[in-house]
Image (spheres, helix red, strand yellow):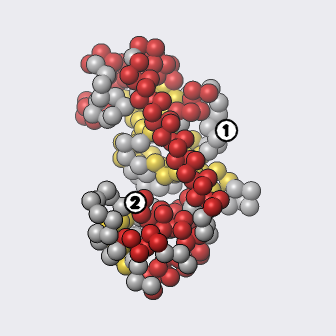
């Protein structure tokens, strides 16, 4: 369901890093053109091949970006959470979306039409730099993914993923607790693994005493031995 923005949503987007330097007039322009979309769990926001007429920002919830793999299974490219954007590259290239977007939970997203964004880019160099920074960061993540999948073992992928979820803390061997942001099936696809392989690796890490699992919550008593471990 798509609706116009309320004042509370406008206030929230004005505090986001991408928009916080915009003046009141620019934010008003965003409010007049952006649309809030409420999407239920399992609902598709767009399909692969749909025309990219703008990009999205997640207000709350989780959006899965994925496409069918050659083997006929789904390949998860990313799980986008609150405060993150997606769809900018396809919009700038005037191409169709290369993936489909599905809500993993009930979610609220904002849609920003390309005409409004291009007008802001022409008016505000700082806004341009922030968009470019976001796209550059995403490209860096994709390069890391290629390295992760091509040069690391299955266990190393899982360990690297868990450690990436850890909050920044001073000291590499302090106990840490992380929460898987989504289901094991989605995490497995994200890491280019089968769900069975992911479960086996988590079981082996638990048996070795390197992690403790309670549902999606994973406790890491000593991160450094986990970082150095390979199965």
Q: Is residue 29 left or right of residue 146?
A: left
Q: Residue at x 33, y 65 (%)?
A: 172
Which one is in front, 66 or 108? 66
Q: How many marks?
A: 2
Q: Earlier in the sequence, mark 1 or mark 2?
A: 1
Give the quarter of the image for residue 110.
Answer: top left
Q: CA distance from mark 1 to mark 2?
A: 31 Å
x 32%, y 70%: residue: 173
Give neighbour class at mark 1: few <14, some 14-19, many 20+ (Cα, 10 Å).
Answer: few
Number of the label disc, if any, that sits on residue 117? none
- Furthest residue in direction right, as rendered: 70
Residue at mark 2:
165
Which image quadrant: the N terminus? top left
Image quadrant in which the C terminus is located:
bottom right
Is residue 7 toward the left or the right of residue 52 in the image? left
Image location of residue 135, percent across then percent down: 50, 35
Which disc, if any, is residue 49? Answer: 1
């Amino acid at each position: 369901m798509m609706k116009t923005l309320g004042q509370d949503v406008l206030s929230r987007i004005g505090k986001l890093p991408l928009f916080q330097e915009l003046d009141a007039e620019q934010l008003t322009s965003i409010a007049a053109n952006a649309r809030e979309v409420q999407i239920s769990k399992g609902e598709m926001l767009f399909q692969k091949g749909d025309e990219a007429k703008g990009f999205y920002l997640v207000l709350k919830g989780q959006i899965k970006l994925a496409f069918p793999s050659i083997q006929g299974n789904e390949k998860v490219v990313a799980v986008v959470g609150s405060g993150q954007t997606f769809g900018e590259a396809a919009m700038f290239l005037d191409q169709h979306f290369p993936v489909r977007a599905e809500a993993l939970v009930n979610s609220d997203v904002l849609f920003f039409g390309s005409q409004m964004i291009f007008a802001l880019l022409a008016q505000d160099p700082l806004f341009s730099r922030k968009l470019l920074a976001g796209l550059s960061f995403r490209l860096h993540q994709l390069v890391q993914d290629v390295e992760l999948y091509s040069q690391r073992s299955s266990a190393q992928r899982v360990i690297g993923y868990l450690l990436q979820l850890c909050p920044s803390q001073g000291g590499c061997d302090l106990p840490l607790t992380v929460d898987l942001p989504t289901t094991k099936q989605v995490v497995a696809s994200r890491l280019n693994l089968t769900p069975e392989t992911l479960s086996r690796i988590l079981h082996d890490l638990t048996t070795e005493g390197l992690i403790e699992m309670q549902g999606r919550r994973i406790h890491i008593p000593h991160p450094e031995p986990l970082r150095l471990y390979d199965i």
